[in-house]
Amino acid sequence: MAGILPAVANDGEQYHGKLTCFVILACMMAAMGGLIFGYDIGISGGVTSIEPFLKKFFHEVYIKMREDKEISNYCKFDSHLLTSFTSSLYVAGLFSSFFASSVTRAFGRKASILLGGANFLAGAALGGAASNIYMLILGRVLLGVGVGLANQAAPLYLSEMAPTKYRGGFNNSFQLSVNIGVLIANLVNYGTQKVKGGWGWRVSLAMAAVPASMLTLGALFLPDTPNSLIQRTNDHEKAKRMLQRVRGTDDVQAELDDLILASEIAKTIKHPFKNIIQRKYRPQLVMSIAIPFFQQVTGINVIAFYAPVLFRTIGLGESAALLSAVVTGSVAIATTTLSMLIVDKVGRRGLLIFGGIQMFVTQMIVGGLIGANLGDHGGVSKAIAFVILVMIGIYIAGFGLSWGPLGWLIPSEIFPMEIRSAGQSITVAVGLFFTFLIGQTFLSMLCHFKYGIFFFFGVWVAIMTTFVYFLLPETKNLPIEKMDRVWREHWFWKRIVGTENNEVTIKVEEA
């Protein structure tokens, strides 16, 4: 255990606490919500490049890939039905994220995580047993409900439980779990595509039940966050005992007082979704929309969903394409781990700007290489394919350092308690909507834009990096219930929210 970790609030108060084993274990379990999300991303992209799966459910794509010699390299996988398989999950997740806001607010973060794991478990069973496209899509919908619930609650849980000084690192564990899930899925796909008899894809889909079971069972033992206990039960003594256990010290009164004040303010808000559009919450609302939107238009889910398809487009074989996806998945894990270690020292803005520049440069190089070397027919040389793979790896490293983990971290820490569940639901819904939109249109975009698809996403990376430089304040090492300070001191946002403290003065009873 570490020593005392003071976190200075804006009024000079200090929070005290230790980095306890209790909070580490609780946060590790909550981060499993990212594991189910990542596993699905990796599996859906992998099975859509496995020929027996395509032959059974998407026969038109299989025929184009195997027999149509006239069709462009860029258009072999262009099928709205195929993209519907991938993107149906995200439509379901979008709608369930709004339902998750009510569950999280009324029953706590733990309840949403538990329901998310259970729905994902049911979807895994249905997908593995699918005998027709309707069963396959229904299974995806159940998976989507699970993802929507877990993605809404898990980042909030992590940010509320973590000590202020280490909040960034703890929250980034969610994205690390996503990357681990993607890597595991790619390894599973690499193994199952070799299964004789062509039924290996069933194992890939059904194996989603493993992380889902871990999340569901683990959620049963998760403690509720002190923030949630105060908000839902008004039992200050119970919340204080939990806070003492989480922080590993009896000296928690300063933090408890801030939680009680935030809870009292939250109770004056009856309609969070209506109140979040007020002027005083304008910066948080903008970020709840802009950050998940930008996270998706980096183009990362193009790589994550369709990496094997993309690698096959440039001429790699089935096994080589899946193995390449494993390599890039390993890069994502390594760089996200690095981000966990440095985010609370370097800060959020620095990583986002550095990662954005890295992603922009590599996307321009990949687009140029494919444009110069890959025509509508044939492939590229092994040397060019290797260089493209390396560039994509560097691009993924940039995302793993920056927009991958920080796209979850920043929204989860900027909302005041009274709009926190609503704000996180908007964040998840926007992210899932654009994940759906890109997932549904990418294969058509690849067919029509060809190598220009990388330039398209590269322009968005340039725009979002500029946005961060001018409009995103630094949020490291500031207590989550004191986050309004960053907007009141920012050169632009203070014009919107003012420079005075907007908190409602409420008489707080002694805990």
Image: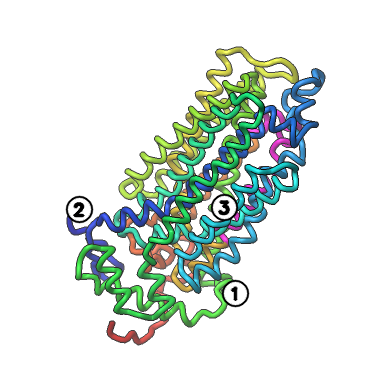
- If the image is split into quadrants, where does the C terminus sit? bottom left
Residue at 57% across / 55% down in the picture?
146
16 shown above or below 196:
below
Q: Amino acid at mark 2?
A: Ala
Q: Nearer the viewer, mark 2 or mark 3?
A: 3
410 shown above or below 371:
below
Look at the numbered disc 2 and give the secondary structure of its residue: loop
Residue labelled with disc 2: 2
The Cα atoms of the two marked residues, 1 and 2, are separated by 42 Å
Residue at 58% across / 35% down in the picture?
303
Residue labelled with disc 1: 274
Residue at 48% across / 52% down in the picture?
33
Residue 474 visible in the current orientation: yes
**Residue 262, labelled with which disc?**
none
Q: Amino acid at mark 1?
A: Lys
- Residue 322 lies in quadrant: top right
Foreground residue, 214 or 406? 214
- Residue 11 lies in quadrant: bottom left
Q: Amino acid at mark 3?
A: Phe
Give the residues in magenta: 426-455
**Residue 120, labelled with which disc?**
3
Q: Nearer the viewer, mark 1 or mark 3?
A: 3
| Percent of width and height locating residue 230 | 38, 76
Foreground residue, 214 or 362? 214
